[in-house]
Image: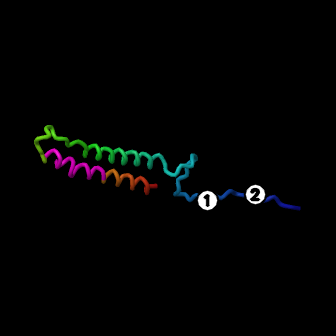
Amino acid sequence: MSKSKEYIPISSASDNEVRTDSGLLFGKKNYTYIIIGTVLIFLGMALMTGGHMPSSDVWDESLIYSFRRITLAPIVILIGLGVNIYAIFVK
């Protein structure tokens, strides 16, 4: 006289945890942020490029030490790095 027992599967994931069927570590939102951050980093690097002198006989500091290269480009790169760090930690 054995009684059949019903087994109820217990989920190991909590209610707040997001599980994907594909088994990827990050979700679509994370990858979107990673792509945005990477684009910002490359944009900052592109803003730093250039600076060749039109004439090799003349030195023009305003081409090398411009606001775009000294201030704007590093800020854009740091924002891109911040977005990538945020993308790693966001759920």
Q: Residue furthest front?
A: 57
Q: Secondary structure at mark 1?
A: loop
Closer-to-camera residue (53/10): 53
Please determine whether, in this image, residue 4 is positioned above or below residue 35.
Answer: below
Residue, disc 2:
6
- Pinpoint residue 68: horizontal percent, then vertical percent: 20, 47
Q: Which numbered dot is residue 36? A: none
Residue, disc 1:
12
Please name the residue shown 13% across and 46% down the image. Answer: 62
- Pinpoint residue 75: horizontal percent, then vertical percent: 26, 52
Decide: few, some or many residues near mark 1? Use Cα within 10 Å; few <14, some 14-19, many ≥20.
few
The reply to whether dot 2 and dot 1 touch (C-beta < 8 Å) is no
Main SS of the magenta segment?
A: helix
Closer-to-camera residue (68/57): 57
Residue 47 part of the magenta-drawn span? no
Closer-to-camera residue (7/73): 73
Q: Quadrant of the N terminus?
A: bottom right
Q: Secondary structure at mark 2?
A: loop
Residue 71 part of the magenta-drawn span? yes
> In this image, 89 relative to 63: left or right?
right
> In this image, 68 relative to 91: left or right?
left
- Pinpoint residue 66: horizontal percent, then vertical percent: 16, 48
- Pinpoint residue 21: horizontal percent, then vertical percent: 58, 47
Q: Amino acid at mark 2?
A: Glu
The magenta segment: 62-77
Please name the residue shown 56% across and 59% down the image. Answer: 14
